[in-house]
Image: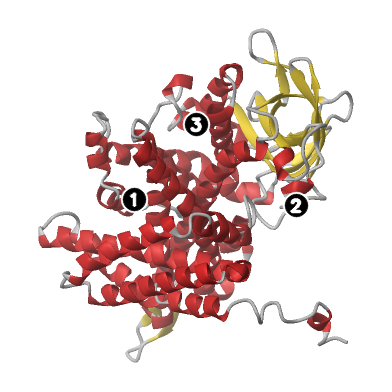
Protein backbone atom coordinates (compact mmCIF):
# COMPACT_ATOMS: atom_id res chain seq x y z
CA UNK A 1 0.00 0.00 0.00
CA UNK A 2 2.46 2.66 -1.16
CA UNK A 3 -0.14 4.72 -3.04
CA UNK A 4 -0.20 8.31 -1.79
CA UNK A 5 0.00 11.67 -3.51
CA UNK A 6 -0.48 14.87 -1.60
CA UNK A 7 -3.63 16.71 -2.73
CA UNK A 8 -1.75 19.85 -3.80
CA UNK A 9 -4.68 21.55 -5.48
CA UNK A 10 -6.89 21.03 -2.46
CA UNK A 11 -4.24 22.23 0.01
CA UNK A 12 -3.48 25.22 -2.22
CA UNK A 13 -7.18 26.10 -2.49
CA UNK A 14 -7.58 26.09 1.29
CA UNK A 15 -4.37 28.01 2.02
CA UNK A 16 -4.52 30.47 -0.88
CA UNK A 17 -8.25 31.18 -1.05
CA UNK A 18 -10.12 29.98 2.04
CA UNK A 19 -7.48 31.30 4.46
CA UNK A 20 -6.38 34.21 2.22
CA UNK A 21 -2.76 33.41 3.09
CA UNK A 22 -1.29 35.96 0.64
CA UNK A 23 -3.29 38.77 2.24
CA UNK A 24 -2.09 37.64 5.68
CA UNK A 25 1.54 37.66 4.55
CA UNK A 26 1.20 41.09 2.96
CA UNK A 27 -0.59 42.61 5.95
CA UNK A 28 2.08 41.32 8.32
CA UNK A 29 5.10 42.28 6.19
CA UNK A 30 6.08 38.66 5.55
CA UNK A 31 7.66 39.68 2.28
CA UNK A 32 9.27 36.35 1.40
CA UNK A 33 6.14 34.28 2.05
CA UNK A 34 3.11 33.58 -0.13
CA UNK A 35 0.98 30.71 -1.37
CA UNK A 36 3.48 29.81 -4.09
CA UNK A 37 6.16 29.42 -1.42
CA UNK A 38 3.85 27.19 0.62
CA UNK A 39 3.43 24.90 -2.39
CA UNK A 40 7.21 24.60 -2.71
CA UNK A 41 7.41 23.57 0.93
CA UNK A 42 4.68 20.95 0.47
CA UNK A 43 6.37 19.59 -2.64
CA UNK A 44 9.55 18.96 -0.69
CA UNK A 45 7.61 17.49 2.24
CA UNK A 46 5.97 14.99 -0.09
CA UNK A 47 9.35 14.07 -1.57
CA UNK A 48 10.61 13.34 1.92
CA UNK A 49 7.55 11.19 2.64
CA UNK A 50 7.94 9.26 -0.61
CA UNK A 51 11.64 8.59 -0.03
CA UNK A 52 11.66 7.79 3.68
CA UNK A 53 8.21 7.13 5.12
CA UNK A 54 5.85 5.31 2.76
CA UNK A 55 7.53 1.93 2.57
CA UNK A 56 8.53 2.03 6.25
CA UNK A 57 4.88 2.39 7.22
CA UNK A 58 4.13 -1.24 6.41
CA UNK A 59 7.52 -2.40 7.66
CA UNK A 60 6.90 -0.79 11.04
CA UNK A 61 3.50 -2.43 11.27
CA UNK A 62 5.08 -5.86 10.79
CA UNK A 63 8.29 -5.24 12.75
CA UNK A 64 7.49 -3.08 15.79
CA UNK A 65 10.10 -1.78 18.25
CA UNK A 66 11.53 -4.17 20.84
CA UNK A 67 12.68 -3.72 24.41
CA UNK A 68 16.08 -5.41 24.66
CA UNK A 69 18.47 -5.09 27.62
CA UNK A 70 16.60 -2.08 28.94
CA UNK A 71 16.65 -0.18 25.63
CA UNK A 72 13.84 0.33 23.14
CA UNK A 73 15.11 -0.45 19.66
CA UNK A 74 12.95 1.26 17.06
CA UNK A 75 11.97 -0.34 13.73
CA UNK A 76 14.97 -0.79 11.44
CA UNK A 77 15.31 2.20 9.12
CA UNK A 78 13.43 4.67 11.31
CA UNK A 79 16.63 6.14 12.75
CA UNK A 80 17.97 6.90 9.27
CA UNK A 81 14.67 8.52 8.32
CA UNK A 82 14.65 10.60 11.49
CA UNK A 83 18.23 11.71 10.89
CA UNK A 84 17.24 12.87 7.40
CA UNK A 85 14.21 14.59 8.90
CA UNK A 86 16.30 16.81 11.17
CA UNK A 87 19.13 17.31 8.67
CA UNK A 88 16.63 18.66 6.13
CA UNK A 89 15.27 21.07 8.75
CA UNK A 90 11.74 19.73 8.99
CA UNK A 91 11.74 19.61 12.80
CA UNK A 92 12.34 23.36 13.09
CA UNK A 93 9.88 24.53 10.43
CA UNK A 94 7.56 26.72 12.52
CA UNK A 95 9.67 27.06 15.69
CA UNK A 96 10.88 30.43 16.93
CA UNK A 97 13.99 31.84 15.26
CA UNK A 98 15.19 32.82 18.74
CA UNK A 99 15.93 29.14 19.41
CA UNK A 100 17.16 28.18 15.96
CA UNK A 101 13.81 27.62 14.29
CA UNK A 102 12.80 28.86 10.86
CA UNK A 103 9.89 30.92 12.16
CA UNK A 104 7.53 29.95 9.34
CA UNK A 105 3.77 30.16 9.88
CA UNK A 106 2.09 27.36 11.77
CA UNK A 107 -0.23 26.65 8.85
CA UNK A 108 2.74 25.35 6.84
CA UNK A 109 3.63 22.94 9.64
CA UNK A 110 0.00 21.77 9.77
CA UNK A 111 -0.03 21.07 6.03
CA UNK A 112 3.33 19.25 6.17
CA UNK A 113 2.16 17.19 9.14
CA UNK A 114 -0.81 16.03 7.10
CA UNK A 115 1.59 14.68 4.49
CA UNK A 116 3.79 12.82 6.97
CA UNK A 117 0.84 11.45 8.90
CA UNK A 118 -0.73 10.18 5.70
CA UNK A 119 2.53 8.47 4.83
CA UNK A 120 3.49 7.05 8.23
CA UNK A 121 1.43 7.84 11.32
CA UNK A 122 3.75 5.98 13.71
CA UNK A 123 6.83 7.93 12.63
CA UNK A 124 5.08 11.31 12.67
CA UNK A 125 4.10 10.94 16.32
CA UNK A 126 7.71 11.39 17.45
CA UNK A 127 8.31 14.92 16.09
CA UNK A 128 4.73 15.92 16.96
CA UNK A 129 5.39 15.37 20.67
CA UNK A 130 8.64 17.27 20.39
CA UNK A 131 6.71 20.28 19.07
CA UNK A 132 4.42 20.08 22.08
CA UNK A 133 7.34 20.02 24.51
CA UNK A 134 8.78 23.09 22.82
CA UNK A 135 5.47 24.91 23.29
CA UNK A 136 5.28 24.13 27.02
CA UNK A 137 8.89 25.08 27.82
CA UNK A 138 8.87 28.20 25.64
CA UNK A 139 5.67 29.55 27.20
CA UNK A 140 6.22 28.62 30.83
CA UNK A 141 9.84 27.60 31.43
CA UNK A 142 12.53 29.71 33.08
CA UNK A 143 15.23 31.41 31.04
CA UNK A 144 17.67 28.73 32.18
CA UNK A 145 15.40 25.87 31.02
CA UNK A 146 14.87 27.54 27.67
CA UNK A 147 18.61 27.98 27.23
CA UNK A 148 19.35 24.38 28.19
CA UNK A 149 16.70 22.55 26.22
CA UNK A 150 14.96 24.54 23.52
CA UNK A 151 17.65 24.79 20.86
CA UNK A 152 18.17 21.03 20.59
CA UNK A 153 14.46 20.32 20.85
CA UNK A 154 13.82 22.78 18.05
CA UNK A 155 16.50 21.25 15.84
CA UNK A 156 15.12 17.78 16.52
CA UNK A 157 18.44 16.55 17.92
CA UNK A 158 16.48 15.85 21.11
CA UNK A 159 12.91 14.58 21.16
CA UNK A 160 10.17 15.20 23.72
CA UNK A 161 7.39 13.30 25.45
CA UNK A 162 4.35 14.04 27.61
CA UNK A 163 3.95 12.00 30.84
CA UNK A 164 0.50 12.30 32.39
CA UNK A 165 -1.27 8.97 32.67
CA UNK A 166 -0.79 6.45 35.46
CA UNK A 167 -2.24 2.98 35.80
CA UNK A 168 -4.41 3.85 38.81
CA UNK A 169 -5.46 7.23 37.44
CA UNK A 170 -6.29 6.94 33.74
CA UNK A 171 -7.92 10.20 32.65
CA UNK A 172 -8.49 11.17 36.29
CA UNK A 173 -5.39 13.30 36.69
CA UNK A 174 -6.41 14.20 40.23
CA UNK A 175 -5.43 10.64 41.18
CA UNK A 176 -1.82 10.99 40.00
CA UNK A 177 0.61 9.60 42.60
CA UNK A 178 4.00 10.37 41.07
CA UNK A 179 5.87 12.57 43.50
CA UNK A 180 8.63 15.12 43.44
CA UNK A 181 10.98 16.02 46.29
CA UNK A 182 13.09 19.18 46.28
CA UNK A 183 16.86 18.69 46.45
CA UNK A 184 19.03 21.77 45.97
CA UNK A 185 18.44 23.33 42.56
CA UNK A 186 16.47 20.36 41.26
CA UNK A 187 13.91 17.75 42.27
CA UNK A 188 13.90 13.98 42.61
CA UNK A 189 11.02 12.34 40.72
CA UNK A 190 9.48 8.99 41.72
CA UNK A 191 6.65 7.10 40.06
CA UNK A 192 5.42 5.24 36.99
CA UNK A 193 3.67 6.53 33.88
CA UNK A 194 1.86 4.50 31.23
CA UNK A 195 0.99 5.03 27.56
CA UNK A 196 4.05 7.21 26.92
CA UNK A 197 4.39 7.57 23.16
CA UNK A 198 7.99 7.31 21.95
CA UNK A 199 9.02 7.18 25.63
CA UNK A 200 12.28 5.52 24.68
CA UNK A 201 14.19 4.94 21.44
CA UNK A 202 17.70 5.37 20.04
CA UNK A 203 16.95 7.89 17.27
CA UNK A 204 18.01 11.01 19.17
CA UNK A 205 20.83 11.89 21.57
CA UNK A 206 18.42 12.71 24.38
CA UNK A 207 14.72 12.47 25.22
CA UNK A 208 13.18 15.30 27.23
CA UNK A 209 10.27 14.02 29.30
CA UNK A 210 7.68 16.44 30.64
CA UNK A 211 6.32 14.77 33.77
CA UNK A 212 3.39 15.65 36.01
CA UNK A 213 4.11 14.92 39.67
CA UNK A 214 2.99 16.05 43.12
CA UNK A 215 5.09 17.96 45.68
CA UNK A 216 4.92 16.86 49.35
CA UNK A 217 2.93 19.90 50.48
CA UNK A 218 0.73 20.09 47.39
CA UNK A 219 -3.04 20.47 47.74
CA UNK A 220 -5.13 17.46 46.70
CA UNK A 221 -6.57 17.02 43.22
CA UNK A 222 -5.41 18.54 39.94
CA UNK A 223 -4.54 21.82 41.66
CA UNK A 224 -1.65 20.07 43.36
CA UNK A 225 0.22 18.94 40.24
CA UNK A 226 3.53 20.41 39.11
CA UNK A 227 5.32 19.95 35.78
CA UNK A 228 8.94 18.87 35.51
CA UNK A 229 11.53 18.54 32.76
CA UNK A 230 13.15 15.13 33.24
CA UNK A 231 15.83 14.38 30.62
CA UNK A 232 16.82 10.82 29.75
CA UNK A 233 20.44 11.93 30.02
CA UNK A 234 21.54 14.68 32.39
CA UNK A 235 23.39 17.57 30.79
CA UNK A 236 27.12 17.91 31.18
CA UNK A 237 29.05 21.16 31.56
CA UNK A 238 28.82 21.80 27.82
CA UNK A 239 25.06 21.29 27.75
CA UNK A 240 25.33 17.95 25.97
CA UNK A 241 23.74 14.64 26.96
CA UNK A 242 25.85 13.17 29.76
CA UNK A 243 25.18 10.45 32.32
CA UNK A 244 21.96 8.43 32.32
CA UNK A 245 19.17 9.71 34.55
CA UNK A 246 17.31 7.37 36.90
CA UNK A 247 14.50 6.50 34.53
CA UNK A 248 13.74 3.60 32.21
CA UNK A 249 11.16 1.93 30.04
CA UNK A 250 10.04 -1.22 31.83
CA UNK A 251 7.67 -2.55 29.16
CA UNK A 252 6.13 -1.87 25.76
CA UNK A 253 2.39 -2.02 25.15
CA UNK A 254 1.12 -4.47 22.51
CA UNK A 255 -1.35 -2.35 20.59
CA UNK A 256 -4.09 -2.69 17.99
CA UNK A 257 -2.34 -0.24 15.67
CA UNK A 258 0.50 2.29 15.29
CA UNK A 259 2.79 -0.66 15.94
CA UNK A 260 5.98 1.19 15.01
CA UNK A 261 5.39 3.86 17.64
CA UNK A 262 6.74 2.52 20.95
CA UNK A 263 4.18 3.06 23.71
CA UNK A 264 6.14 2.77 26.93
CA UNK A 265 5.56 2.16 30.61
CA UNK A 266 8.09 4.55 32.14
CA UNK A 267 9.51 4.21 35.64
CA UNK A 268 11.14 7.15 37.42
CA UNK A 269 13.36 6.98 40.49
CA UNK A 270 13.80 3.22 40.99
CA UNK A 271 17.26 3.79 42.46
CA UNK A 272 18.13 7.27 43.75
CA UNK A 273 15.37 9.35 42.16
CA UNK A 274 15.18 10.80 38.65
CA UNK A 275 16.49 14.35 38.52
CA UNK A 276 13.97 16.87 37.20
CA UNK A 277 13.59 20.64 36.90
CA UNK A 278 10.32 22.40 37.62
CA UNK A 279 8.56 24.40 34.94
CA UNK A 280 7.05 27.62 36.23
CA UNK A 281 5.42 27.76 39.65
CA UNK A 282 4.55 24.98 42.06
CA UNK A 283 1.14 23.35 41.55
CA UNK A 284 0.46 24.93 38.15
CA UNK A 285 1.60 21.88 36.22
CA UNK A 286 -1.70 20.93 34.66
CA UNK A 287 -2.21 24.47 33.38
CA UNK A 288 1.24 24.38 31.78
CA UNK A 289 0.70 20.89 30.41
CA UNK A 290 -2.42 22.05 28.61
CA UNK A 291 -0.21 24.26 26.41
CA UNK A 292 1.40 21.08 25.18
CA UNK A 293 -1.81 19.07 25.21
CA UNK A 294 -3.86 21.54 23.18
CA UNK A 295 -1.12 21.65 20.55
CA UNK A 296 -1.18 17.87 20.46
CA UNK A 297 -4.99 17.73 20.31
CA UNK A 298 -5.10 19.81 17.16
CA UNK A 299 -2.25 17.67 15.86
CA UNK A 300 -4.30 14.51 16.43
CA UNK A 301 -7.14 16.05 14.44
CA UNK A 302 -4.68 16.52 11.59
CA UNK A 303 -3.67 12.87 12.02
CA UNK A 304 -7.31 11.94 11.41
CA UNK A 305 -7.23 14.05 8.27
CA UNK A 306 -4.01 12.42 7.08
CA UNK A 307 -5.23 8.88 7.60
CA UNK A 308 -8.57 9.70 5.95
CA UNK A 309 -6.87 11.15 2.88
CA UNK A 310 -4.68 8.06 2.58
CA UNK A 311 -7.71 5.77 2.95
CA UNK A 312 -9.58 7.75 0.28
CA UNK A 313 -6.72 7.48 -2.20
CA UNK A 314 -6.31 3.74 -1.62
CA UNK A 315 -10.06 3.17 -2.01
CA UNK A 316 -10.18 5.35 -5.13
CA UNK A 317 -7.34 3.46 -6.79
CA UNK A 318 -8.95 0.10 -5.99
CA UNK A 319 -12.38 1.19 -7.23
CA UNK A 320 -10.89 2.47 -10.47
CA UNK A 321 -9.14 -0.83 -11.22
CA UNK A 322 -11.39 -3.52 -9.74
CA UNK A 323 -13.42 -5.30 -12.45
CA UNK A 324 -16.75 -6.65 -11.22
CA UNK A 325 -19.38 -7.93 -13.67
CA UNK A 326 -20.43 -6.68 -17.11
CA UNK A 327 -23.07 -4.41 -18.59
CA UNK A 328 -25.80 -5.55 -20.98
CA UNK A 329 -23.43 -5.23 -23.92
CA UNK A 330 -20.94 -7.54 -22.25
CA UNK A 331 -18.44 -4.79 -21.40
CA UNK A 332 -16.48 -5.21 -18.18
CA UNK A 333 -17.45 -2.86 -15.35
CA UNK A 334 -15.18 -1.29 -12.80
CA UNK A 335 -16.77 -0.86 -9.40
CA UNK A 336 -16.23 2.93 -9.51
CA UNK A 337 -19.16 2.90 -11.95
CA UNK A 338 -21.53 1.50 -9.31
CA UNK A 339 -23.82 3.96 -7.54
CA UNK A 340 -23.18 2.69 -4.01
CA UNK A 341 -19.41 2.72 -4.49
CA UNK A 342 -19.68 6.27 -5.80
CA UNK A 343 -21.66 7.16 -2.67
CA UNK A 344 -18.90 5.81 -0.42
CA UNK A 345 -16.17 7.56 -2.42
CA UNK A 346 -18.07 10.85 -2.24
CA UNK A 347 -18.45 10.47 1.53
CA UNK A 348 -14.70 9.91 1.73
CA UNK A 349 -13.88 12.84 -0.55
CA UNK A 350 -16.26 15.40 0.92
CA UNK A 351 -15.65 14.37 4.53
CA UNK A 352 -11.89 14.64 4.08
CA UNK A 353 -12.18 18.04 2.41
CA UNK A 354 -14.29 19.36 5.28
CA UNK A 355 -11.79 18.02 7.81
CA UNK A 356 -8.92 19.66 5.96
CA UNK A 357 -10.71 23.01 5.86
CA UNK A 358 -11.38 22.82 9.61
CA UNK A 359 -7.88 21.63 10.60
CA UNK A 360 -6.16 24.24 8.46
CA UNK A 361 -8.54 26.99 9.61
CA UNK A 362 -7.92 26.16 13.27
CA UNK A 363 -4.16 25.92 12.72
CA UNK A 364 -4.13 29.28 10.98
CA UNK A 365 -5.76 30.91 13.99
CA UNK A 366 -2.45 30.36 15.80
CA UNK A 367 -0.71 32.47 13.16
CA UNK A 368 -3.35 35.19 13.46
CA UNK A 369 -2.91 35.17 17.23
CA UNK A 370 0.88 35.50 16.93
CA UNK A 371 0.59 38.27 14.34
CA UNK A 372 -1.75 40.21 16.64
CA UNK A 373 0.49 39.90 19.71
CA UNK A 374 0.78 43.68 19.97
CA UNK A 375 -3.01 44.04 19.97
CA UNK A 376 -4.20 42.31 23.12
CA UNK A 377 -7.89 42.46 22.14
CA UNK A 378 -7.40 40.76 18.77
CA UNK A 379 -4.95 38.25 20.25
CA UNK A 380 -7.46 37.41 22.97
CA UNK A 381 -10.17 36.87 20.37
CA UNK A 382 -7.94 34.49 18.42
CA UNK A 383 -7.03 32.62 21.61
CA UNK A 384 -10.71 32.17 22.46
CA UNK A 385 -11.41 30.93 18.94
CA UNK A 386 -8.53 28.43 19.17
CA UNK A 387 -9.80 27.18 22.53
CA UNK A 388 -13.30 26.69 21.13
CA UNK A 389 -12.17 24.92 17.97
CA UNK A 390 -9.62 22.59 19.56
CA UNK A 391 -12.04 19.99 20.99
CA UNK A 392 -14.03 20.07 17.73
CA UNK A 393 -10.92 19.49 15.63
CA UNK A 394 -9.77 16.68 17.88
CA UNK A 395 -13.13 15.08 18.64
CA UNK A 396 -15.13 15.44 15.44
CA UNK A 397 -12.33 14.89 12.94
CA UNK A 398 -11.11 11.71 14.61
CA UNK A 399 -14.62 10.29 15.00
CA UNK A 400 -15.33 10.98 11.34
CA UNK A 401 -12.05 9.26 10.49
CA UNK A 402 -13.43 6.02 11.95
CA UNK A 403 -16.36 6.19 9.55
CA UNK A 404 -14.21 7.08 6.56
CA UNK A 405 -11.55 4.40 6.95
CA UNK A 406 -14.31 1.84 7.47
CA UNK A 407 -15.91 2.99 4.22
CA UNK A 408 -12.57 2.66 2.46
CA UNK A 409 -12.40 -0.94 3.63
CA UNK A 410 -15.98 -1.49 2.46
CA UNK A 411 -15.07 -0.23 -1.03
CA UNK A 412 -12.53 -3.06 -1.18
CA UNK A 413 -15.06 -5.68 -0.15
CA UNK A 414 -13.45 -8.86 1.16
CA UNK A 415 -10.05 -7.80 -0.17
CA UNK A 416 -10.01 -4.93 2.30
CA UNK A 417 -10.21 -7.30 5.24
CA UNK A 418 -6.94 -8.89 4.17
CA UNK A 419 -3.85 -7.27 5.67
CA UNK A 420 -1.95 -7.16 2.36
CA UNK A 421 -4.42 -4.63 0.93
CA UNK A 422 -3.24 -2.09 3.52
CA UNK A 423 -6.63 -0.74 4.53
CA UNK A 424 -6.69 -2.96 7.62
CA UNK A 425 -3.61 -1.17 8.93
CA UNK A 426 -5.24 2.22 8.40
CA UNK A 427 -8.34 1.05 10.28
CA UNK A 428 -6.18 -0.22 13.15
CA UNK A 429 -3.93 2.84 13.21
CA UNK A 430 -6.88 5.24 13.14
CA UNK A 431 -8.65 3.67 16.11
CA UNK A 432 -6.35 5.29 18.67
CA UNK A 433 -7.12 8.79 17.42
CA UNK A 434 -10.41 9.10 19.33
CA UNK A 435 -8.70 7.91 22.51
CA UNK A 436 -5.28 9.44 23.10
CA UNK A 437 -4.76 13.08 24.06
CA UNK A 438 -8.20 12.94 25.66
CA UNK A 439 -11.06 10.71 24.50
CA UNK A 440 -13.93 12.07 22.46
CA UNK A 441 -16.00 12.18 25.64
CA UNK A 442 -13.39 14.38 27.30
CA UNK A 443 -13.30 16.67 24.27
CA UNK A 444 -17.09 16.90 24.35
CA UNK A 445 -17.16 17.79 28.05
CA UNK A 446 -14.45 20.39 27.44
CA UNK A 447 -16.49 21.94 24.62
CA UNK A 448 -19.66 21.99 26.71
CA UNK A 449 -18.38 23.03 30.13
CA UNK A 450 -15.25 25.11 29.54
CA UNK A 451 -15.77 26.42 26.03
CA UNK A 452 -19.52 27.03 26.01
CA UNK A 453 -21.08 27.28 29.47
CA UNK A 454 -18.13 28.98 31.16
CA UNK A 455 -18.59 32.11 29.03
CA UNK A 456 -22.38 31.63 28.79
CA UNK A 457 -22.15 30.78 25.09
CA UNK A 458 -20.30 33.95 24.04
CA UNK A 459 -17.74 32.29 21.76
CA UNK A 460 -20.32 29.88 20.39
CA UNK A 461 -22.52 32.89 19.62
CA UNK A 462 -19.69 34.57 17.72
CA UNK A 463 -19.20 31.44 15.64
CA UNK A 464 -22.91 31.29 14.86
CA UNK A 465 -22.87 34.97 13.84
CA UNK A 466 -20.02 34.33 11.39
CA UNK A 467 -21.90 31.41 9.89
CA UNK A 468 -24.90 33.73 9.47
CA UNK A 469 -22.74 36.13 7.45
CA UNK A 470 -21.74 33.32 5.10
CA UNK A 471 -25.39 32.32 4.83
CA UNK A 472 -26.27 35.84 3.68
CA UNK A 473 -23.66 35.56 0.92
CA UNK A 474 -24.95 32.15 -0.10
CA UNK A 475 -28.48 33.46 -0.47
CA UNK A 476 -27.27 35.65 -3.34
CA UNK A 477 -25.31 32.87 -5.08
CA UNK A 478 -27.04 31.36 -8.16
CA UNK A 479 -25.33 28.01 -7.54
CA UNK A 480 -25.86 27.88 -3.78
CA UNK A 481 -29.51 26.87 -3.28
CA UNK A 482 -28.93 23.40 -1.84
CA UNK A 483 -26.06 24.50 0.38
CA UNK A 484 -27.98 27.58 1.52
CA UNK A 485 -30.98 25.58 2.68
CA UNK A 486 -28.85 22.91 4.39
CA UNK A 487 -26.64 25.47 6.15
CA UNK A 488 -29.64 27.55 7.15
CA UNK A 489 -31.24 24.52 8.79
CA UNK A 490 -27.98 23.45 10.42
CA UNK A 491 -27.41 26.96 11.77
CA UNK A 492 -30.87 26.90 13.32
CA UNK A 493 -29.99 23.52 14.84
CA UNK A 494 -26.83 25.03 16.30
CA UNK A 495 -28.72 27.92 17.86
CA UNK A 496 -31.36 25.59 19.26
CA UNK A 497 -28.70 23.31 20.73
CA UNK A 498 -26.96 26.24 22.41
CA UNK A 499 -30.24 27.55 23.83
CA UNK A 500 -31.22 24.10 25.13
CA UNK A 501 -27.82 23.57 26.72
CA UNK A 502 -27.90 26.91 28.54
CA UNK A 503 -31.37 26.09 29.86
CA UNK A 504 -30.47 22.53 30.90
CA UNK A 505 -26.97 22.83 32.34
CA UNK A 506 -27.51 19.91 34.73
CA UNK A 507 -27.84 17.53 31.76
CA UNK A 508 -24.79 18.78 29.90
CA UNK A 509 -22.66 15.66 30.41
CA UNK A 510 -25.32 13.44 28.85
CA UNK A 511 -25.66 15.51 25.69
CA UNK A 512 -22.02 16.60 25.30
CA UNK A 513 -21.15 14.00 22.66
CA UNK A 514 -24.03 14.99 20.38
CA UNK A 515 -23.27 18.68 20.98
CA UNK A 516 -19.68 18.17 19.80
CA UNK A 517 -20.78 16.24 16.73
CA UNK A 518 -23.30 18.93 15.83
CA UNK A 519 -20.60 21.59 15.98
CA UNK A 520 -18.29 19.44 13.87
CA UNK A 521 -20.80 18.98 11.07
CA UNK A 522 -21.80 22.64 11.32
CA UNK A 523 -18.31 24.17 11.22
CA UNK A 524 -17.29 21.72 8.51
CA UNK A 525 -20.39 22.71 6.55
CA UNK A 526 -19.71 26.41 7.08
CA UNK A 527 -16.18 26.10 5.67
CA UNK A 528 -17.43 23.98 2.78
CA UNK A 529 -20.03 26.69 2.07
CA UNK A 530 -17.31 29.33 2.04
CA UNK A 531 -15.32 27.08 -0.29
CA UNK A 532 -18.36 26.82 -2.56
CA UNK A 533 -18.63 30.60 -2.79
CA UNK A 534 -14.92 30.96 -3.56
CA UNK A 535 -14.95 28.25 -6.24
CA UNK A 536 -18.04 29.76 -7.83
CA UNK A 537 -16.44 33.20 -7.93
CA UNK A 538 -13.23 31.86 -9.46
CA UNK A 539 -15.19 30.05 -12.16
CA UNK A 540 -17.22 33.16 -12.96
CA UNK A 541 -14.00 35.11 -13.44
CA UNK A 542 -12.26 32.44 -15.50
CA UNK A 543 -9.59 31.86 -12.86
CA UNK A 544 -8.02 28.64 -11.64
CA UNK A 545 -8.40 25.04 -12.76
CA UNK A 546 -12.00 24.78 -13.97
CA UNK A 547 -12.11 21.00 -13.67
CA UNK A 548 -11.00 21.14 -10.03
CA UNK A 549 -13.35 24.01 -9.24
CA UNK A 550 -16.34 22.26 -10.81
CA UNK A 551 -15.52 19.21 -8.71
CA UNK A 552 -15.35 21.46 -5.63
CA UNK A 553 -18.89 22.69 -6.31
CA UNK A 554 -20.13 19.10 -6.51
CA UNK A 555 -18.25 18.01 -3.39
CA UNK A 556 -19.51 20.91 -1.29
CA UNK A 557 -23.07 20.23 -2.44
CA UNK A 558 -22.69 16.55 -1.56
CA UNK A 559 -21.43 17.46 1.91
CA UNK A 560 -24.51 19.64 2.41
CA UNK A 561 -26.81 16.82 1.32
CA UNK A 562 -25.19 13.97 3.24
CA UNK A 563 -23.18 15.34 6.19
CA UNK A 564 -24.59 18.73 7.09
CA UNK A 565 -28.09 17.29 7.47
CA UNK A 566 -26.83 15.24 10.42
CA UNK A 567 -27.04 18.28 12.69
CA UNK A 568 -30.80 17.66 12.93
CA UNK A 569 -30.26 14.16 14.33
CA UNK A 570 -27.73 15.53 16.81
CA UNK A 571 -30.21 18.18 17.92
CA UNK A 572 -32.96 15.59 18.41
CA UNK A 573 -30.66 13.56 20.64
CA UNK A 574 -29.66 16.67 22.60
CA UNK A 575 -33.28 17.62 23.19
CA UNK A 576 -34.03 14.09 24.41
CA UNK A 577 -31.78 14.97 27.33
CA UNK A 578 -30.34 12.57 29.83
CA UNK A 579 -33.38 11.10 31.54
CA UNK A 580 -33.45 7.88 29.52
CA UNK A 581 -29.66 7.68 29.51
CA UNK A 582 -29.56 7.66 33.30
CA UNK A 583 -32.80 5.79 34.03
CA UNK A 584 -31.55 2.18 34.21
CA UNK A 585 -30.18 0.91 37.48
CA UNK A 586 -26.76 -0.69 37.26
CA UNK A 587 -28.39 -4.08 37.82
CA UNK A 588 -30.78 -3.54 34.93
CA UNK A 589 -27.88 -3.33 32.50
CA UNK A 590 -27.47 -7.04 33.22
CA UNK A 591 -31.20 -7.83 33.20
CA UNK A 592 -31.02 -9.62 29.85
CA UNK A 593 -28.65 -12.25 31.23
CA UNK A 594 -30.16 -12.81 34.70
Hey, which residue is sitting farthest left in the picture? 541
Please tell me whether mark 2 sits on a helix, a strand or a loop: loop
Eyeballing the image, is 584 above or below 135? below
Which residue carries the number 2 mark?
170
Residue at (54% x, 61% y) in the render: 448
Toward which corner of the image does residue 230 lie, by quadrant? top right
Which residue carries the number 1 mark?
11
Q: Is residue 220 left or right of residue 311?
A: right
Which mark is in front, 3 or 2?
Answer: 2
Position of residue 518 measured from the top left corner of the image (x, y, whole percent)? 47, 69
Position of residue 85 measured from the top left corner of the image (x, y, whole percent)? 51, 32
Report if the CB atoms under discs 1 and 3 are less than 8 Å apart.
no
Label 3 crowd (10 A; few <14 / some 14-19 / many >=20): many
Report if the CB atoms under discs 2 and 1 are less than 8 Å apart.
no
Toward which corner of the image does residue 567 lie, by quadrant? bottom left
Most foreground residue, 500 or 147: 500
Residue at (32% x, 61% y) in the render: 465
Which residue carries the number 3 mark?
91
Amino acid sequence: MSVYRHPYKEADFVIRHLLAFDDFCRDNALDDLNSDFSQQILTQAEKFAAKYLLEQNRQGDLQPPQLIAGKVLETVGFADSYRAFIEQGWASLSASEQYGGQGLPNILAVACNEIWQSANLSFSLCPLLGQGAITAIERHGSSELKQQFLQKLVSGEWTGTMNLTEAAAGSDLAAIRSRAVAEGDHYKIYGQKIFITWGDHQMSDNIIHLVLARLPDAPPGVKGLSLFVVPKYLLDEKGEAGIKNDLRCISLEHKLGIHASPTCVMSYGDENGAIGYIIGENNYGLHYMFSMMNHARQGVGVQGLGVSERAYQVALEYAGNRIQGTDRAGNSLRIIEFGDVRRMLMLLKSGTEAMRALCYYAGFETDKKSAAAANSEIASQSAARIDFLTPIVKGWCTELTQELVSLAMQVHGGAGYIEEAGIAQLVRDARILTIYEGTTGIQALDLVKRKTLLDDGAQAGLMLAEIQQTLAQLEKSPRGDVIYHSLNTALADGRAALDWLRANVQQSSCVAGDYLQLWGYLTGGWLMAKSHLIASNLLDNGLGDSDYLQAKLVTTKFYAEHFLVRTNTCLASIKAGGDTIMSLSEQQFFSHVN
